[in-house]
Image (cartoon, rainbow, N blue to C red):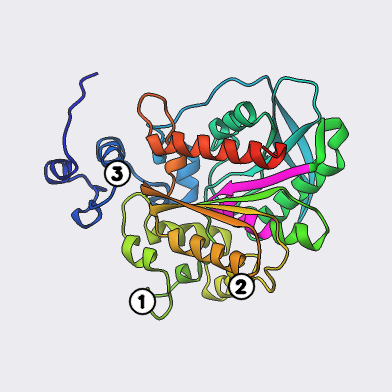
Amino acid sequence: MTIITTTATQTQETAAPRLGIKREHLAGLDPKWVELWNTHGAQMVRADEVSIEEYRQNPAAYSFTYPTCAGPDVFRVEDMQVPVTTPAGEMTVRVYSPKGPGPFPVHLNFHGGGWVLGGLNSEAAWCRHMCNKANIKVIDVDYRMAPEYPFPTSIYDCWDAVKWAIANAQVLNIDPNSVSIGGLSAGGQMSAVLAHFARDEGIDLKLHLMIVPATDMRYCMKGLELDKSNCPYQSVHLFHDVPWGPLGREKWFLKYWLGDSVEKQREALNNWICTPVLAPSFDNLAPAHIITAEFDLERDEGEYYGELLRKAGNKVTVKRYAGMPHAFGHYNHPERGLKQSFEYIEDTSRLLRSVHYSE
């Protein structure tokens, strides 16, 4: 393979691809990401540029997977069926187990994808790394998605998975007193909500991990023209038109998750389980860690949610990854990934080991 070395500015000037990065976004944006996107992503068609039916015919065609990998081997991987309640049915979870007698601490992961896209392959690499590096079981939750299962099904599926894991601790060979939860983007939103559910039902979580979370998407409501009066988050105004994750993409997700009418979206977005910044109480929540990306329109709402947690007296840490786009955590291919993705894997594995083993 021939590697052409170029600067970010040269890439912008010579490439001019359909989804090329604009000059105003280059300052501070990681040069490796600029190269990756402009070379391998900028000519693609994003999922939100087609219908969900078209996307499902060939998901790989609408996904930026060049800098991703499947992850390392782990001792055991098994799929299990879990009963769910809202509405009644079943879903699959994938259990990653380290070697050893156990019982092990457990972390439940809720994948990203706007409550519409994704599945058990979305964050498989991260789950495998966590299993190995933190020496914990990881349960990846294949919650049911919109449009067939719109809001709030996915949230309650994830909550059913948490309660199922605790109730079946002996069978799963896990410690029911050492449970953490987390997720990326949509999964981060659900992790935020489930921490409130856990507090209200007396379940003590070791951690809720929110990775580039969507905590307040009211600015995405159908028909709303973005301005300072309806969106207080500077990151939205700065990055609403970035090619890898613009505001239109967020609106596409909500169209399927919440429904395609102003009335349905307004009703849902004013419900705190859709918009966690509206939660009635932030008291006595599990310890939290929030990860944001500098070049992500959802950056500021995630950091604002951290402030709400902190002001209520909760233990919370926040880390912003400089120069990174929204889904940087996925780009972990050992030869062509982003160094910040590897840093994120190391950071989160150390954190999970620490909260579960008191190290």
Res 278 label: 2
Mark 1 Cα shell of 10 Å, populated few (<14), some (14-19), many (≥20): few
Q: Which residue is mark 1?
A: 227
Classify the position of the N terminus by image quarter.
Answer: top left
Q: Earlier in the sequence, mark 1 or mark 2?
A: 1
Q: Earlier in the sequence, mark 3 or mark 1?
A: 3
User: Residue 327 location, x and y as percent?
Assistant: 44, 45
Residue 44 seen in the current view:
yes
Which of 249/32 is in front? Answer: 32
For discs 1 and 2, the disc positioned in front in the rendered view: 2
Residue appearing at x 49%, y 61% in the figure: 303
Cα distance, mark 1 to mark 2?
20 Å
Vertical placement of 281 versus 60: above or below? Answer: below
Indicate the secondary structure of the residue bearing disc 2. helix
Mark 2 Cα shell of 10 Å, populated few (<14), some (14-19), many (≥20): some
Residue appearing at x 40%, y 59% in the figure: 297
Q: Which residue is mark 3?
A: 30
Residue range highlighted in magenta: 178-194
User: How many labels sit on residues?
Assistant: 3
Vertical placement of 258 versus 27: above or below? Answer: below
Residue 275 seen in the current view:
no
Left or right of residue 220, residue 123 in this image? right
| Marks 1 and 2 close (CB-CB < 8 Å) | no
Amino acid at circle 1: Asp
